[in-house]
Image (cartoon, helix red, strand yellow):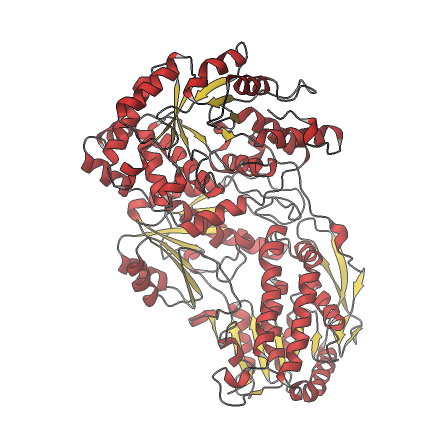
Amino acid sequence: MPTTSPAARALADVTASDGTLRRFLHGLPGVDAVGLEARAASLGTRSIKTTAKAYAIDLAISMVDLTTLEGADTPGKVRALGAKAVRPDPTDRTTPATAAVCVYPDMVPAAKEAVAGSTVKVASVATVFPAGRAALAVKLADVRDAVAAGADEIDMVIDRGAFLAGNYMKVYDEIVAVKEACGTSARLKVIFETGELSTYDNIRRASWLGMLAGADFIKTSTGKVAVNATPANTLLMLEAVRDFRAQTGVQIGVKPAGGIRTTKDAIKFLVLVNETVGEDWLDNHWFRFGASSLLNDLLMQRQKLATGRYSGPDYVTVD
Amino acid sequence: MASASASAFEYAPAPESRSVVDIAPSYGLFIDGEFTEAADGKVFKTVSPATEEVLSEIAQAGEADVDRAVKAARKAFEKWSALPGSERAKYLFRIARIIQERSRELAVLETLDNGKPIKETRDADLPLVAAHFFYYAGWADKLDHAGFGTSPRPLGVAGQVIPWNFPLLMLAWKIAPALATGNTVVLKPAETTPLSALFFADICRQAGLPRGVVNILPGYGDTGAALVGHPDVNKVAFTGSTAVGKEIARTVAGSRKKLTLELGGKGANIVFDDAPIDQAVEGIVNGIFFNQGQVCCAGSRLLVQESIQDELLESLKRRLSTLRLGDPLDKNTDIGAINSAEQLSRITTLVEAGEAEGAERWSAACELPSSGYWFAPTLFTNVTQAHTIARDEIFGPVLSVLSFRTPDEAVAKANNTQYGLSAGIWSEKGSRILAVANKLRAGVVWSNTFNKFDPTSPFGGYKESGFGREGGRHGLEAYLDV
């Protein structure tokens, strides 16, 4: 931990042993599921119109990690994705670039080339995404490979099996090792796969575990399971980064991923950020959307605001 | 708007349209199915508390009007009470459906007249109003099975006096069970919020309700007193302040009138150290800042376990700074206007007393609109049981924070009040919740939530919070000869 405040030092002690870590994580305040979901739903009723909507759409576009994670990905597809990330709407050059493109490790070189010279970062889902079921050495090799190819950000999956078995130290050690493998050049996003952690208490514990281990970002999910990012689990993670900063002074980013497809949904998430952690998190260094189809809806809504009428899917690029 | 103005992501105004509601320049009394002027021609004005704009001029009922309305209700009672329950149910179902159909109009109207945010009238008040009529419509033909004997009979004419904090909801709580059980009604809405009751009169006509079954008499306290004291009223139901409740009890004493009173409260919201903190903060906010704290069951005393007091207060202050105060018609407004100048001055006086007695005041840094009646969300720390603000009902957005060390102390402090309407418990431990709930002298105890209402759930108080229950099966008893 880069800071040495007493609170931060006390937190460092909690990772001294399996027992202290478990006691700390289980001592975190509980989460009342009904209350959490009610709060997320009530923020979802905010009415965002006109200038606020225009601002939110541009902000959301700039926060998108434009993602392709298919077995069928080709360098050609990744190049197309990169071009789109740099210039999402060729008909309107005022459209901001996305935050990053997110690809499998072997596609990092193609992605780097496609976004060269722009602000767009290349993120790579290393650590044997999406299941993460491999030896640590294999995961670390995956990470080093991606970093060596120039990845600016590594999205790692945690070992959910170890977490659910209560083997928190193993998960912690893996994150620490991956963080080390990222070196100073790549930021680390830690994916919990919240749908598999199944309880909100687990999600809060995982959030703290990830932050203690040095994650730069905590991320909901892979997008490969039934339940991915929801307003409730994202609200919970925002509360965790808020509390973590209050205790340590260290700010951690948040990335909901999977299932966010419409502008309306994206704006609801921005409202959560705005009213839970505030403007300190309202830029793409601290908040991201992991999404593939969201961008086109944002672009269509943006065109609608600019022209006053809806166009259609043929007025935005497919990839 | 506290934090919103400081944020780069400032929400553009999103006002609900006023044009969905058509407010006439003047309204009469609703007696025997007709709108009519007051016998002595008296009128008063109702204003929008957010802007001080005059909304309409309302006829003010005097003694002669009360007498006329009670006579109309008495006459209607013969036929109405003789109808089969299933027939009465039809009317109630019809009223419920019309309320749903006109809910947007009624929500805007209620917000204009009362000052509460549209998101509360739209998402809380109106759905509950319709639900109450639906619920009691369902009981109308099942009274023989409600547990009050084989054929419980209605009482007769019910004189009902309701407050200004939930004008339409309190009307529903009173009128729905009264009609379902076969009584007829003369209702006096509060002088600051008569409009939704008068719109309800129109709904009764729209539903084809027989003349005289429901009569609406806007007016001040003297109108209420005349109604309560009328010799031909069989049942009195009152929701409002404890002081007025006591007066009513004195008036009714010795007569054969049946009486229920829903009065003030000073609800304790108890937060244990193992509570879900973030949700508890939301519950505290909902408990005391819902409807600007103008709720008789508000959780106006926060009892927090000493070990988490600092952490909780910090979270709470941060949360209060994000509350958006302003135009009640804006869909993004969390905190609306105080209902009247009179109420605002009462809140201000009590808050000054709190400061003078040494409690520490903290108010959210809100910019208050220049016209209308407003009060920033406020909390007091260093409060003890001996402070006025820990004992008197403030009926405004003001929270008093006290601490405790053990569950016994929490219970003792929570019960140490002349009131007993509501309480809240926040803990992750189920056994603790049940143990504490059993010891609290309060009509409603919420756990890990607050201010949740449902037509199936009885509501009412202990001690100076009144007696009798509204809502649920228990709510029928107040309108039946059992």
Image quadrant where one finds the C terminus of chain A:
top right
User: Splitting the image into 4 quarters, where does residue A181 fall?
Assistant: top left
User: Does residue A160 lie above or below A129 as drawn?
Assistant: below
Q: Is residue B476 left or right of residue B232?
A: left
Q: Nearer the viewer, residue A246 or B182?
A: B182
Task: Reply above or below: B268 against B382.
Answer: below
Could you tell me if residue B30 is visible in this image? Answer: yes
- The image quadrant that residue A212 belongs to is top left
Q: Is residue B134 left or right of residue A50?
A: left
- Percent across and percent down for residue A154 are 40, 22
Residue nearer the viewer, B405 or B228:
B405
x, y percent for residue B43 = 77, 66
Query: Which residue sits at x=55%, y=88%?
Result: B256
Q: Position of residue A39 (x, y in %)?
A: 49, 47
Could you tell whether A229 is left or right of B65 in the image?
left
Give the answer, above or below, for where B272 lies relative to A163. below
Location of residue B163 with respect to A81 vertically, above or below:
below
Number of marks in the rendered image:
0
User: What is the residue that sits farthest to the top in this orientation?
Assistant: A117
Does any portion of residue B355 appear in the rendered image?
Answer: no
Residue in view at x 81 percent, y 60 percent = B25
Q: Residue at x 55, y 44 (%)?
A: A44
The percent position of residue B177, horizontal first and vertical second, equals 58, 76
Q: Quadrant of the N terminus of chain A?
A: top left
Q: Nearer the viewer, residue B145 or A293?
A: A293
Q: Residue at x 63, y 50 (%)?
A: B373
